[in-house]
Image (spheres, grey):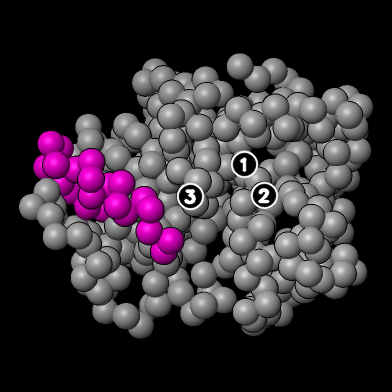
Amino acid sequence: MTDEVDGKILRALQCAPRASFRLIGEVAGVSEQTAARRFHALRRSGVMRVVGLVDPAVHGDARWVARIRCRPDRVGPLADALARRPDIAYAGLASGGSEIICVISAPVHVPRDDVLLRQLPKSASVLDVSIDLLLHPFGAPGRSDWTGHGGRLTPEQIQLLVGERPLTPVGPPVRLTEEDAPLLDALAEDGRASHTQLADVTGWSTARVARRLDALESSGALLYGVELLAARLGFALSATLWLRVAPARLERVGEELAGHDEVAFAAAISGDSNVMVIAVCRDNEDLYRYLSMKVAAVPGIDGYSVSIRVHTLKQATSLISRGRLVPSAFA
């Protein structure tokens, strides 16, 4: 189990995934060496990974949310096949194992049925499929991540970590080239790879690596994520909430929900339920308290349904294998 120092290190990484261990140690109240040792222990144990991600918009893609209702006795092979697809960024089993929920990257102009259906393996397990466009994520990156693991930082500590980085990208995403592939592959495996390590895999100078990273990051083409295996941190219950919100209140409701400690992700989507929220709780009573006290106190929610996650298969670039986060290529 993690302690308060680990929690602060995780929170620091969520705010600034590539911050130096000196800076992380400063806000966590430990030495640079202790911060590095704690980080590497968390990473080796498979509890946490820092990964570099390419914004799907760079390739002209959007994100789609698919709910695939299946026969519980036939769902396993289909779910595993979907999780290994590179265009799927998240996959999990919910509703007692009868539903697969996944997030897919695909162009907006492609007919909705083509996003997933034509590429689904032939399977008699599929009973029904619904696909909705992910319209807008709520919350600022790194500042509205799941924080239920603890490790609270003061506003001053967060400002120290993020420095003068703008909250929103500057200009359109930079166009990627074939030369960027080794750089992006290395960051997908380790989002904290040093300039020297990245220079080794690309054959570039460290100065060129720094310039390219700055261009990709500042334009929003390259993002970073901190993937956490919540169950290993003592949070055994995760749920997807499907909320109905009046359009006039959509932005305010979404931003308020994104700020909840229990929320790992919140976004506006198309469809009858127009807000999707992923909540992470310790147990069923914890989820009940969250729904009955926090969600109930948000004005503008007209209705909701809940899909209880029973097994997460994939988070961004990581598969879940034997209770560990591992790179997709190594699972």
Which of 173/32 is in front?
A: 32
In the image, 74: left or right of 209? left
For label 2, the SS is loop
Lower sequence index among marks 1 and 2: 1
- Specify whether residue 139 is painted magenta: no
CA neighbours of label 2 inside 10 A, class few (<14), some (14 to 19), many (20+): some
Which of 95/254 is in front?
A: 95
Where residue 46 appears, x then y in whole percent?
Answer: 57, 32
Q: Which of the numbered marks, if any, corresponds to residue 49?
A: 1
Residue corresponding to mark 3: 328
Estimate the spatial distance between the alpha carbons at disc 2 and disc 3, rounded to whole Å. 12 Å
Q: Amino acid at mark 3?
A: Ser
Where residue 117 appears, x then y in whole percent?
Answer: 21, 66
Point 65% across, 20% down: residue: 2
Point 82% across, 47% down: residue: 19
Q: Which of the numbered marks, if any, corresponds to residue 12?
A: none
Residue corresponding to mark 2: 190
Asked if 45 appears above or below 205 in the picture, the reply is above
For label 3, the SS is helix
Q: Amino acid at mark 1?
A: Arg
Which of 310/139 is in front?
A: 310
Viewer can see residue 307 = no
Viewer can see residue 85 = yes
Tell me whether the residue at label 1 lies in contact with that at label 2, contact meaning CB atoms closer than 8 angstroms.
no
Task: Indicate which label's residue lies in the foreground, 3 or 1.
Answer: 3
Magenta residues, start to end: 67-87
Task: Indicate which label's residue lies in the foreground, 1 or 2.
Answer: 2
Asked if 160 appears above or below 11 in the picture, the reply is below
